[in-house]
């Protein structure tokens, strides 16, 4: 059989099958590389507080470098613009976030707005009480983790609830029109008005595995092996046909002699 495999026709077929197998193997390697999703390692500098205005620009998209950073900001929490977000968890218990409308001060130009999550309360009454206290005596200096805006949940509005911190939705609820808005929001690292501190850990560094991509990678490996097996099967079939034809011709020759 191997003498047949060394013929130019079958050598060319082998080269073609190997090229196809190599392409399948490359696709499998690509799928495998995509199956492991690593979280972005936390740069130690991200935990060093920096002024918000140095990282983020109002009315412009939030950059990856700014997301998750510890920032500082000074300004005034506007009375009447507090919002309560329901369904926010703390140690597995659903409660309320108190979110304020901060107008940043001390800048060379403009007074942009920032949504600030000031703390968590177990009940709506506790959250409303905290708002009353903040209306009378609100802090003017904040530090905390700066995060991307959440997506608005339309179903919550239809049910008369609001549980996502979507900056775009808050802008429409604030009674005072903002002079530019930061694209993210701040989780204060010092809870105000007897509220519970909201947990805001550094960005995740965990490794997650995408099993669907691993399955695809195995499939490509099988296809690569099948390409080589197909060549072997075709060579073997051709060899068996030649053997059958040879046996038939020998049998016919033997019959004629007899």
Image: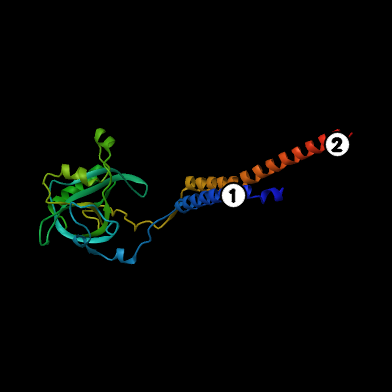
Task: Pick out the residue farthest to the front.
Answer: 257
Residue on which disc 1 sits: 12
Mark 1 Cα-neighbour bin, 10 Å: few <14, some 14–19, many ≥20? few
Measured in 3D between alpha carbons, the distance from the residue under mark 1 to the one under mark 2, in whole angstroms, is: 37 Å
Whole-percent x, y for residue 75 in the image: 14, 58
Q: Is residue 128 visible?
A: no
Residue on which disc 2 sits: 254
Taking the image as shown, residue 96 lies to the left or right of residue 205, namely left
Task: Pick out the residue farthest to the right.
Answer: 258
Whole-percent x, y for residue 22 in the image: 53, 52
| Scheme of colours in the image | rainbow
**Observer-nearest of 195 and 231:** 231
Taking the image as shown, residue 256 lies to the left or right of residue 110, namely right
Residue at the image point whose x is 27% and y is 58% from the top: 66
Q: Mark 1 or mark 2, which is nearer to you?
A: 2
Taking the image as shown, residue 210 lies to the left or right of residue 65, namely right
Whether 48 is drawn above or below 31: the answer is below
**Quarter holding residue 174:** top left
**Observer-nearest of 177 and 217:** 217
Q: Earlier in the sequence, mark 1 or mark 2?
A: 1
């Amino acid at each position: 059989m191997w003498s047949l495999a060394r013929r130019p026709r079958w050598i060319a077929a082998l080269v073609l099958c190997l090229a196809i197998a190599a392409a399948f193997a490359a696709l499998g390697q690509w799928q495998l590389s995509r199956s492991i999703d690593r979280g972005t390692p936390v740069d130690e500098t991200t935990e060093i507080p920096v002024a918000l205005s140095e990282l983020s620009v109002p009315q412009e998209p939030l950059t990856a470098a700014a997301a998750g950073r510890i920032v500082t900001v000074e300004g005034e929490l506007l009375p009447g613009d507090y919002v309560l977000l329901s369904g926010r968890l703390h140690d597995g218990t659903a409660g309320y976030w108190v979110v304020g409308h901060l107008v940043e001060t001390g800048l060379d130009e403009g007074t942009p707005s920032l949504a600030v999550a000031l703390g968590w309360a177990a009940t709506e009454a506790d959250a409303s009480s905290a708002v009353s206290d903040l209306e009378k005596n609100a802090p003017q200096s904040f530090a905390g983790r700066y995060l991307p805006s959440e997506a608005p949940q339309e179903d919550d509005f239809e049910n008369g609830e609001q549980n996502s911190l979507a900056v775009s939705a808050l802008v429409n609820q604030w009674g005072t029109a903002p002079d530019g808005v930061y694209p993210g929001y701040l989780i204060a690292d010092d809870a105000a008005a007897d509220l519970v501190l909201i947990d805001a850990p550094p960005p995740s560094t965990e490794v997650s595995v995408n099993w669907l991509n691993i399955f695809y990678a195995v499939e490509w490996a099988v296809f690569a092996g099948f390409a080589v097996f197909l060549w072997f099967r075709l060579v073997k079939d051709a060899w068996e046909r030649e053997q059958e034809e040879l046996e038939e011709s020998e049998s016919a020759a033997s019959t004629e002699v007899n």
